[in-house]
Image: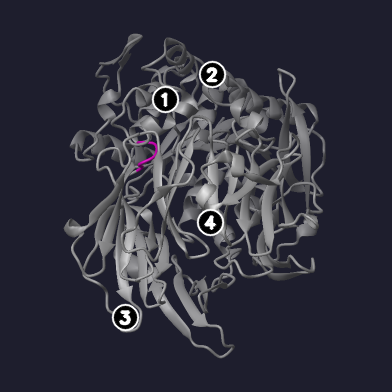
Amino acid sequence: MTRDPPRPARRPTEVRSPFGSRSDPYYWLRDDTRRDPAVRAHLAAENAYCEAWFEPLAPLVARLEAEMTARLKPDDASVPVRDHGYWYFSSYLAGAEFPRYLRRGLAADAPEELLLDAADAARGRDYYEVGALEVSPDNRVLGWAEDAVGRRQYVLRFRDLAGREAYPEALENAEPDLAWCDDSRTVLYVAKDPETLLGRRVMRHRLGTPQAADVCLYEEGDASYYLGVHRGKSGRFLYITLHSTLASEYRYARAADPALAFTVAVPRARDHEYQLDDVGERFVLRTNDAAPNFRIVSAPIAAVADRRSWRDEVAARDDAFVAGFEAFRDHLAVAERSGGLRRLRVRTWDGREDRLIDGAEPAFTMRLGAHEEQDTTLLRYVYSSLTTPPSTYDYDMASGKQVLLKREPVEGGYEPARYASEFRFAPARDGARVPVSLLYRRDLPRDGRAPLYQVGYGAYGLSQDPAFRSSVLSLVDRGFVFAIAHVRGGQELGRSWYDAGRLLAKQHTFDDFVDVTRFLVAERYVDPARACGMGGSAGGLLIGAVANQAPGDYRALAAHVPFVDIVTTMLDESIPLTTNEYDEWGNPAASRAVYEYLLGYSPYDNVARQAYPALLVTTGYHDSQVQYWEPAKWVARLRELKTDARPVLLRVELEAGHGGRPGRYERFREIAEEYAFLLAAVGHPDAAAQPLG
């Protein structure tokens, strides 16, 4: 195998917009059909070069992978969830990449019943992933979604659970969710547009009939919305959900209604986002109406569209962000963010009791667990921190007592006391205070010599919570400080934190990431010559911008499935997800200001003749979220223009999509390779076989 990096041919293509044209020398690497032999040959050459570069590190990669997989309990099982007279759970057989999905009756001696063996379904396939898995109301039919390519074009299948016979139909090109009607013979699903891969039509399917006979119940004409279906917790209603970046709409129908007459709950309106569920004779909504950080209201079902009927259950607060809720018969459970961390609050509907469930560690997160029944006082929640593995609790909302049901096992002698965590605020250059979560060994000297592994995301209002990651112990045990930079674009500090990191304020995301690194250097946590960073997807865009804007601050960067060609993608409505993203990034075809702003930070367009950190870039050939050609083009341009001799590597997963390899064990191979790359970059003795110079 060659040691010379691939150099794809330059074939300039004009990329036009209403506000100017750009010449793209590597546009030809885009192949929507994924059949072009020249493109396939180039990607194969990239993999060959990557393999050759990692060859001296192969023993280290294998050792790291073995460390990570050894921390998993081989035959682990999930905590059972109660639903319609059964306990539902999943389990792994020792060494299996995929779980088995099972149930058993409520009696203590009830036998286990196998619903689906994903390991068996995946056998002989290069890729396999299970989406939704739903049992019919009469408990007799299983419906599930599966993806055998990685393109997120799911196939829905059905099986009779009594006789184990599979129904003949396979519903192609669907979203991964489905909703059963009360007759247990009718199911709703969302059909995708074959080109943009966006959910567009809600279809009604009768078991045992061909997909061609399915009836369209609803078609969405606005390409900025994501479409979904589900059955509510009470079981009385089916919901059609529509969400864009800045607006929502729910439609509901009685699950027992053969006509499935859907009614709009609250009509969509610009800048109004809400979620909805029913309990008793009312709807409960999480809404940002008159509440930037959201509030929770309730209203009579028939009057929910009239906002004058809304009654505050959880009022708006400036110091707390309402992130989600679960509605029960007698209680309301709320996920809230305050002080940068996620906590839970439980209250009675009359407001007489209100309790905060908090954490005792510096950096932690709490999330609502799986609930399928409303008539209960037990709240299932999961607690985790940088040192505490995910821990599932049942909390009695009536008494306040809680029981630990399971703490995820970490094999191999893991001792939390060996590690320290902190939650700090780093000063940003514009005066903002950026939260940062830290993990390191307690015996690590605070002398400014430690290597740094810093991760960030900062988009879509998604927060990177300080949860346990067993894999990162392989770096921390080798002297790294692990940092999560909670940059603007997430919602760790509320809605304003998100708004300050999108559209024409996106530069804050990149500045925050760099300013966190500089803070950690100034506070003598880490060595400025050994700082490394990582991000994926929109976090890969962050890494790409940082590589251009602050290359001297980092020794090495890892960008997974990175969104790096933002201008070209946002100009092309045929590319999956483009139209959904206008309120996140802006529409460069509709505004000169947006066009120029995106062009100002686009990683691909701003590669310069300068020295860069060492770069490891990954992509999935079938990625539906960030098309493979974005990172492929970026790597080609980096190699063409950069002035240093540090490596730029591209790993292409030819049989995977946006999430990489889905198996329980195989996902650690990619992480092990990334860690070996970073260890080589910082000159760790374990990676002496591949010095970066």
Relative depth, front residue between 458 and 251: 251
Report the residue at 82% width, 49% height from top: 443
Residue that carries the numbered disc 2 in the rendered image: 504
Give the percent coordinates (x, y) of residue 10: 27, 19
Please tell me whether mark 3 sits on a helix, a strand or a loop: loop
Q: Amino acid at mark 1?
A: Ile
The mark nearer the N terminus, 2 or 3, is 3
Q: Amino acid at mark 2?
A: Leu
Mark 4 and mark 2 in contact (Cβ < 8 Å)?
no
Q: Amino acid at mark 3?
A: Arg
The mark nearer the N terminus, 2 or 4, is 4
Q: Would you say 54 lies left or right of 360 here?
A: left
Residue that carries the numbered disc 1 in the rendered image: 566
Residue that carries the numbered disc 4 in the rendered image: 65
Disc 2 to disc 1, C-alpha distance? 14 Å
In this view of the protein, can residue 662 be seen by the observer?
no
Is label 3 or label 4 in front?
3
Q: Amino acid at mark 4?
A: Glu
Question: How many other residues sit within 10 Å of disc 3, few (<14), some (14-19) or many (≥20)?
Answer: few
Report the residue at 81% width, 49% height from top: 442
Span of residues in magenta: 623-627
Mark 1 and mark 2 in contact (Cβ < 8 Å)?
no
Residue that carries the numbered disc 3 in the rendered image: 164
